Image (spheres, helix red, strand yellow):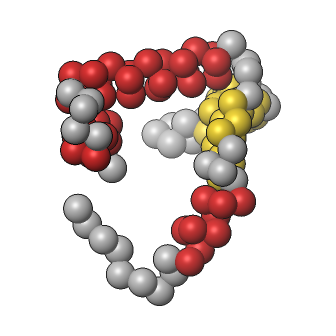
């Protein structure tokens, strides 16, 4: 599902919510999550999952073109860990056909 599909689904599910307002709400939520992660905070949405920032230590890599060793610096990467309810819902879908909306 893309961001625009999420906005359309929200507007469809809640008729009192205009698509422009749904777009604004989704943007605010995603911006708040991104800002919190950029500040190094952890976000937990009960029943859905948690977002955190993991550090990837520096390592020695290789340039694929020349084969020479290159130092890859430390990186911070967002990480999502699904909650128990979400894992169980997804697991219940195993073996069932995927619905394409």
Q: Within the image, what quadrant is residue 19 found in? A: top left
Q: Residue at x 66, y 51 (%)?
A: 47
In this view of the protein, can residue 71 be seen by the observer? no
Q: Is residue 34 left or right of residue 7?
A: right
Q: Residue at x 35, y 74 (%)?
A: 98
Residue 7: percent from left, percent from top:
28, 36
Is 48 left or right of 96, judged from the image as shown?
right
- Image position of 62 with respect to 17: above or below: below
Residue 67, position as x, y percentages in the image: 57, 41
Location of the C terminus (image quadrant)? bottom left
Q: Is residue 70 above or below residue 15?
A: above
- Image quadrant where residue 40 sits: top right
Q: Nearer the viewer, residue 87 or 67?
A: 87
Residue 2, image x, y percentages:
31, 43
Name which residue lies at 35% across and 81% down: 97
The quadrant holding residue 92 is bottom right
Q: Residue furthest front?
A: 16
Depth order, front residue of 38/7: 7
Residue 8 relative to residue 64: left or right: left
Q: Nearer the viewer, residue 6 or 35?
A: 6
The count of marks equals 0
Instruction: Pick the residue in front: 17 or 23.
Output: 17
Residue 49 visible? The answer is yes
Residue in view at x 21 percent, y 22 percent: 20
């Amino acid at each position: 599902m893309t961001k625009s599909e999420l906005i359309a689904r929200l507007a469809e599910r809640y008729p009192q919510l205009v698509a422009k307002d749904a777009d604004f709400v989704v943007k605010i939520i995603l911006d708040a999550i991104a800002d919190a992660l950029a500040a190094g905070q952890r976000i937990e949405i009960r029943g859905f999952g948690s977002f955190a920032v993991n550090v990837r230590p520096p390592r020695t890599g290789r340039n694929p073109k020349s084969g020479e060793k290159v130092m890859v610096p430390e990186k911070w990467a967002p990480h999502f860990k699904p909650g128990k309810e979400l894992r169980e819902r997804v697991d219940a879908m195993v073996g069932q056909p995927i619905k394409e909306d």
